[in-house]
């Protein structure tokens, strides 16, 4: 069963085409939507929420038509925007209770749900203080709480890790994973960093300039793009030649070698080659592929 | 701080109410905002101080009725006499209703829920109308209750009281629409306050100016129309047409009253609503 599906979806603005003939289907679980800034991620979410009419094509969310049943969709879906969206002079509790009512929850239910959800996202006593005094991490948690408060079937998270420090980023990612697994709420999460989505997603969609580059389960994805970075003191070129002879795919990037991982044997080959050539191996690091790498491969592949 | 507690997630399977409920909840939330309820203490000072100032003349009027058996403050003239206070309330509180949602971009959180932009704007206008109506109608009602208790000679001025309360509602609609439209075009709070008060001052100051220009140019009877540039006198003129109350223009001035001023009032409200609709259509597309 598909949580959402688009068919030839297109959105043209006077100057740009934000979404271009996009056909994707997303199943339950956590799905990552990856693209550079301006790739059309936010536009796609607005179309799926029924807030922006598409120029062409069709989109269905939870089996509802995005162009005609927008209000129905928005009743069952949560949305965390990318930008700052919190008024500074009210407390997190007051805001989340209010937004729960805006989603149709009666007064007492709104109170209970808001308290529950704020605890789940990790806001304790500070939830009674005005939001103006919160850190970026706490604000992101409030934004997430308001998207969850009406117990949606699906949530759209637009760049939820934006502006967070490494620890906050890890906590946010863990929380998103929990939402997708323990809470049983399907998640569509956008990012321009493929690396961080790999850790939490079941499925990844890559778009660029509004067009679909790739849509596949996360296992296929990481296998296809796994690399290891090798750094040696001297003799980078002999090592590269030796590895190429051994059937590995090697590319030189400055003082580093990037070797495509074909399987566990790749690591053995690198180790053996370094020993044979009597090289001083400084580091071997699992490649962190960024969105750029995928683009490079896709472009090379096309 | 910010530990994630593991208490398990509970799903919600209770009722999900419709858009009418959401619109009412937003109206109430905004109305609380106008009076600073649920906000820090400093947000309550201005609205409550102005509310108390509005009550003072009513208290004095009741005292005079009790002690001197005299009516010093006619119901129908209350809004016109207190117009500066009402205008300050409008200027200081209109931005609290619309500005934060625009300035801090809270609007997308509403629009990603079932409510439409139209319902959102309706709720905002309704909250400001209720606030302004309370500001004018509560002192009027206090005065009327005082009159009944004091037991003045002659019948109580019930007709005039009911008329003035109805006109308070009309005045609240006219002022709210313009206050919110101006505040929504200037989402910074300080600017919003300034723009509303400047427009009010201009509309008041232009009355004698336009009047004397017309009068000196020989359009003596047409000059009276200048009074209607001020929203309070415009509503007062409609009141004297509908309820036959005397005009409350200063210095015994009189102004045209009749269907024409009612028509001007309706057209003005329409223009204000159109401006609001336009503003929010643009804001929603962001």
Image (spheres, grey):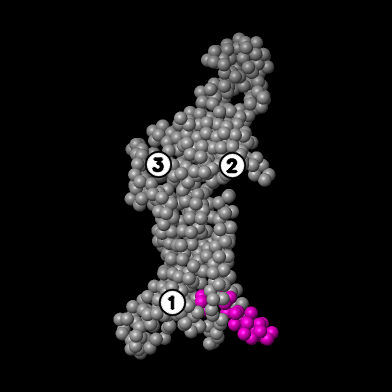
Q: In the rendered image, which residue does mark 2 sit on?
A: A54
Q: Quadrant of residue A223?
A: top right
Query: Disc 1, disc 3: CB below 8 Å?
Result: no
Q: Chain of mark 2?
A: A
Q: Residue at x 60, y 80 (%)?
A: B225
Residue B52 visible: no
Q: Which mark is residue B164?
A: 1
Question: Which class describes the residues within 10 Å of circle 2: few (<14), some (14-19), or many (20+)?
Answer: many
Q: Is residue B54 above or below residue A77?
A: below
Residue toward you, B236 or B83: B236
Quick check: B155 left or right of A47? left
Q: Which mark is residue A151?
A: 3
Where residue A54 appears, as percent x and y from the top left, is 59, 42
Q: Secondary structure at mark 1?
A: helix
Q: Nearer the viewer, mark 1 or mark 3?
A: 1
Q: Residue at x 47, y 82 (%)?
A: B244
Residue A249 visible: yes
> Mark 3 vs mark 2: same chain?
yes
Q: Secondary structure at mark 3?
A: loop
Q: Residue at x 34, y 39 (%)?
A: B10
Query: Disc 1, disc 2: CB below 8 Å?
Result: no
* Residue B213 in magenta stretch: yes
Count of all numbered marks drawn on residues in the image: 3
Quick check: A186 left or right of A228? left
Q: Which mark is residue B110?
A: none
Residue at mark 1 to residue at mark 3: CA–CA distance: 48 Å
Where residue A44 appears, as percent x and y from the top left, is 56, 39
> What residue range appears in magenta?
B210-238
Q: Chain of mark 3?
A: A
Query: Disc 3, disc 2: CB below 8 Å?
Result: no
Question: Which class describes the residues within 10 Å of circle 3: few (<14), some (14-19), or many (20+)?
Answer: many
């Amino acid at each position: 069963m598909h949580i959402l599906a688009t068919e030839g979806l297109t959105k043209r603005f006077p100057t740009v085409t934000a979404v271009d003939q996009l056909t994707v289907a997303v199943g339950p679980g956590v799905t990552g939507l990856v693209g550079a800034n301006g790739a059309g991620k936010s536009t796609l979410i607005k179309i799926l929420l029924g807030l922006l009419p598409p120029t062409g094509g069709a989109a269905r969310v939870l089996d509802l038509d995005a162009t005609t049943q927008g209000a129905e969709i928005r009743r069952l879906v949560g949305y965390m925007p990318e930008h700052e969206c919190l008024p500074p002079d009210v407390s997190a509790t007051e805001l989340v209770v209010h937004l729960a009512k805006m989603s149709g929850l009666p007064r007492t239910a709104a109170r209970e749900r808001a308290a529950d959800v704020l605890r789940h996202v990790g806001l304790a006593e500070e939830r009674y203080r005005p939001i103006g005094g919160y850190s970026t991490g706490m604000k992101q948690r409030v934004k997430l709480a308001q998207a969850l408060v009406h117990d949606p079937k699906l949530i759209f998270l637009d760049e939820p890790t934006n502006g967070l420090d490494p620890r906050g980023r890890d906590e946010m990612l863990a929380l998103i994973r929990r939402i997708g697994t323990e809470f049983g709420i399907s998640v569509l999460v956008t990012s321009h960093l493929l690396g961080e989505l790999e850790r939490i997603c079941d499925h990844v969609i890559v778009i660029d300039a509004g067009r679909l580059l790739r849509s596949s389960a996360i296992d296929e994805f990481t296998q296809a793009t796994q690399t290891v970075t090798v750094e040696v003191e001297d003799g980078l070129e002999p090592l590269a030649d030796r590895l190429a002879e051994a059937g590995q795919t090697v590319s030189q990037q400055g003082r580093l070698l990037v070797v495509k991982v074909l399987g566990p044997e790749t690591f053995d080959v690198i180790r053996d080659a370094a020993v044979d050539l009597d090289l001083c191996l400084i580091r071997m690091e699992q490649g962190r592929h960024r969105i750029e790498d995928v683009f490079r491969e896709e472009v090379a592949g096309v | 701080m910010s530990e994630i507690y593991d208490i398990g997630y509970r799903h919600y399977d209770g009722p999900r109410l419709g858009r009418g409920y959401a619109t009412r909840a937003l109206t109430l939330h905004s109305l609380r905002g106008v009076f600073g309820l649920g906000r820090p203490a400093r947000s309550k000072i201005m609205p409550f101080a102005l509310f108390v100032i509005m009550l003072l003349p009513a208290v004095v009027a009741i005292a005079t009725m009790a002690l001197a058996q005299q009516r010093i403050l006619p119901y129908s003239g209350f809004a016109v006499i207190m117009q500066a206070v009402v205008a300050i309330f409008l200027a200081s509180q209109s931005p609290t209703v619309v500005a934060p949602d625009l300035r801090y971009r809270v609007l997308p959180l509403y629009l990603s829920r079932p409510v439409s932009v139209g319902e959102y704007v309706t709720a905002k206008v309704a909250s400001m109308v209720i606030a302004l109506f309370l500001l004018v109608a509560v002192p009027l009602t206090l005065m009327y209750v005082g009159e009944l208790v004091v037991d003045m000679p002659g019948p109580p001025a019930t007709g005039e009281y009911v008329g003035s309360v109805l006109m308070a509602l009309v005045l609240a609609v006219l002022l709210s629409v313009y206050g919110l439209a101006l505040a929504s075009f200037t989402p910074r709070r300080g600017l919003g306050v300034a723009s509303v008060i400047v427009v009010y001052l201009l509309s008041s100051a232009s009355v004698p100016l336009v009047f004397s220009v017309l009068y000196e140019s020989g359009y003596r009877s047409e000059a009276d129309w200048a009074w209607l540039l001020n929203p309070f006198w415009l509503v007062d003129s409609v009141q004297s047409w509908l309820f036959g109350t005397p005009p409350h223009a200063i210095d015994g001035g009189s102004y045209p009253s009749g269907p024409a001023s009612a028509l001007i009032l309706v057209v003005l409200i329409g223009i204000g609503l159109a401006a609001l609709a336009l503003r929010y259509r643009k804001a929603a597309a962001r």
